[in-house]
């Protein structure tokens, strides 16, 4: 139920954002790399931008804005209406009853949505790019084919990218849902506090997601330093 | 076996310092923190109160005197600034006084607005605590839900959501939900507030049934003084921050005390 709430309802907007973002990324990378003579780095750059970094972050931002805010509104309204107190007075632990389903559903949904975002950004982004190239009469003079793009991306993918495709969405999903529930459960009994809690929930989720991303990125710095030592 | 369902000794409750609250710990951690209080802002002071098993007591008084706050203290939803509370002879230390801990002693609460879970149907609202605590097999739980719905006459509304129900119906569902858990002590916050005479007349016999059939101890917070007459139970008043002795309705009606003059004036005038 929570996964459905978090994921399915956001599908169309996520698909559109992913497609347009993918198209922009592919066009920029192809044109810039071609100009600079770094055509071999097209795959690596797309993997870094779409799969490793901005894909998970944009997905998390969309889910924080759509589902995190809804979760804060829902639980915040429950606090105002004494429903959370009613749960506690029946011996029903509100954390177990409200937060845990949100947390598990949010993590699963974030994982699925991240894969969906990256896949849409590359596949649908490629199609849109081809359409744009066709419509503009190929003024960029690029020979973009699916076999070229897919081979470049597959060659650039590393095992750590697959690992982080699991870790990042789970971490971001946990951040969004726990922060949304935390902000909601802490509001005072005043209906005006609900919209304030919602904006706090979204803005703080953005902040925590970026901080978490930076912390996770430390792995790549450590990995880079290790490789440098091997070379020296 | 203790004869008392509830005993409260020297209960005090003060407002939290509003300025300090901006920088204080979050509300959800409130159960674990010391409360910053100002003695000048005391809402409840030196309340001593006890209820026998199976007894029904009403707590009355003008609005804003802290009646609901007192009920929330008993339910463990608000921690008193000072004082001791015993449930069925068992003392719960103040640092452990939480709603979850109190609920383990089979203390139920019916909120003023019903506080039904908005995304659950009537049937599931009543069944929620039973399923959560695994109080029987699925068939037994279904039977208990049906019994509760029959007792409170909400069987026809079983598949409706709370927002589809009238205020009176929501209160009956809330009572059914509390009753289904077999509470030994039931706390009711303004059960007749917002009800018309017809629904009020229908609700009181249902409360009376719980008392007579199931020997449930009931504490009712209300400004509807006639409840104590109709249920033939004692009533006490939260007056000037403290609680008076529980006495029968007729005692207060004929008393010359300040609280009687204040609250029973209209009833006396109407004869």
Image (cartoon, coloured by chain):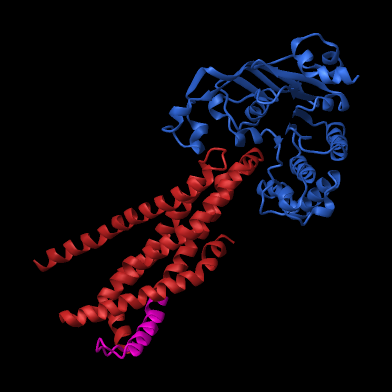
Which x, y percent locates residue A203?
40, 52
**Which residue lies at the image location 62% right of the left edge and 39% below the top edge?**
A85
Image side of residue B228 versus residue A137, left or right: right
Task: Specify whether residue A202 is painted magenta.
Answer: no
Q: Is residue B60 above or below residue A231?
A: above
Q: Quadrant of the N terminus of chain A?
A: bottom right
Q: Nearer the viewer, residue B262 or A184?
A: B262
Q: Is residue A158 above or below residue B170?
A: below
Q: Residue at x 29, y 56 (%)?
A: A214
Q: Colour of chain A?
A: red
The answer, for residue A132, to whether it is visible in the render is yes
Q: Tell me the shade of chain B.
A: blue
Q: Is residue A132 magenta?
A: yes
Q: Give coordinates of residue A114: x percent, y percent.
A: 42, 68
Residue in view at x 65 percent, y 25 percent? B64
- A16 relative position to B120: left or right: left
Report the magenta residues as a range.
A119-146
Q: Quadrant of the C terminus of chain A?
A: bottom left
């Amino acid at each position: 139920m929570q996964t459905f709430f978090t994921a399915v309802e956001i599908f169309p907007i996520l698909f559109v954002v992913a497609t347009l973002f993918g198209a922009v990324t592919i066009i920029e990378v192809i044109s810039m790399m071609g100009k600079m003579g770094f055509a071999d780095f097209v795959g690596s750059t797309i993997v870094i931008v779409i799969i490793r970094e901005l894909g998970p972050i944009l997905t998390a931002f969309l889910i924080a804005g759509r589902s995190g805010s809804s979760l804060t509104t829902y639980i915040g309204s429950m606090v105002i209406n004494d429903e959370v107190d009613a749960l506690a007075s029946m011996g029903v632990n509100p954390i177990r009853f409200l937060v845990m389903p949100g947390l598990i559903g949010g993590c699963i949904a974030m994982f699925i949505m991240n894969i969906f975002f990256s896949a849409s950004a590359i596949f649908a982004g490629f199609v849109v790019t081809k359409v744009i190239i066709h419509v503009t009469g190929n003024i960029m003079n690029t020979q973009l084919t699916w076999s070229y793009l897919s081979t470049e991306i597959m060659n650039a993918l590393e095992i750590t990218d697959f690992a982080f495709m699991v870790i990042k969405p789970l971490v971001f999903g946990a951040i969004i849902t726990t922060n949304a529930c935390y902000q909601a459960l802490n509001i005072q009994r005043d209906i005006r506090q609900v919209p304030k809690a919602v904006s706090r929930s979204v803005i703080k989720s953005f902040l925590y997601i970026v901080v978490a991303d930076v912390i996770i990125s430390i792995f790549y710095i450590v990995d880079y330093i290790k490789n440098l030592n091997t070379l020296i | 076996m203790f004869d008392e369902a509830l005993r409260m000794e020297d209960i005090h409750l003060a407002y939290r310092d509003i300025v300090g609250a901006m920088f204080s710990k979050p509300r959800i951690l409130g159960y674990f923190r010391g409360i910053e209080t100002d003695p000048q802002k005391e809402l409840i002071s030196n309340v001593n109160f006890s209820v026998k098993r199976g007894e029904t007591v009403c707590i009355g008084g003008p609005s804003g005197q802290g009646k609901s706050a007192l009920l929330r203290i008993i339910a463990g939803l608000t921690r008193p600034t000072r004082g001791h509370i015993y449930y069925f002879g068992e003392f719960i230390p103040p640092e452990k006084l939480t709603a979850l801990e109190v609920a383990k002693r089979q203390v139920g609460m019916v909120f003023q607005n019903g506080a039904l879970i908005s995304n659950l149907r009537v049937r599931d609202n009543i069944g929620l605590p039973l399923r959560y605590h695994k109080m029987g097999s699925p068939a037994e739980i279904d039977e208990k839900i049906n019994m509760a719905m029959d007792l409170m006459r909400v069987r026809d509304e079983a598949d409706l959501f709370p927002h589809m129900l009238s205020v009176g119906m929501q209160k009956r569902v809330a009572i059914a939900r509390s009753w289904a858990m077999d509470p030994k002590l039931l706390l009711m916050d303004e059960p007749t507030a917002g009800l018309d005479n017809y629904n009020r007349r229908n609700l009181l016999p249902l409360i009376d049934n719980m008392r007579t059939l199931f020997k449930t101890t009931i504490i009712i917070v209300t400004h509807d003084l006639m409840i104590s007459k109709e249920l033939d139970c004692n009533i006490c008043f939260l007056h000037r921050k403290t609680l008076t002795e529980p006495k029968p309705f007729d005692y207060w009606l004929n008393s010359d005390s300040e609280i009687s003059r204040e609250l029973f004036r209209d009833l006396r005038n109407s004869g």
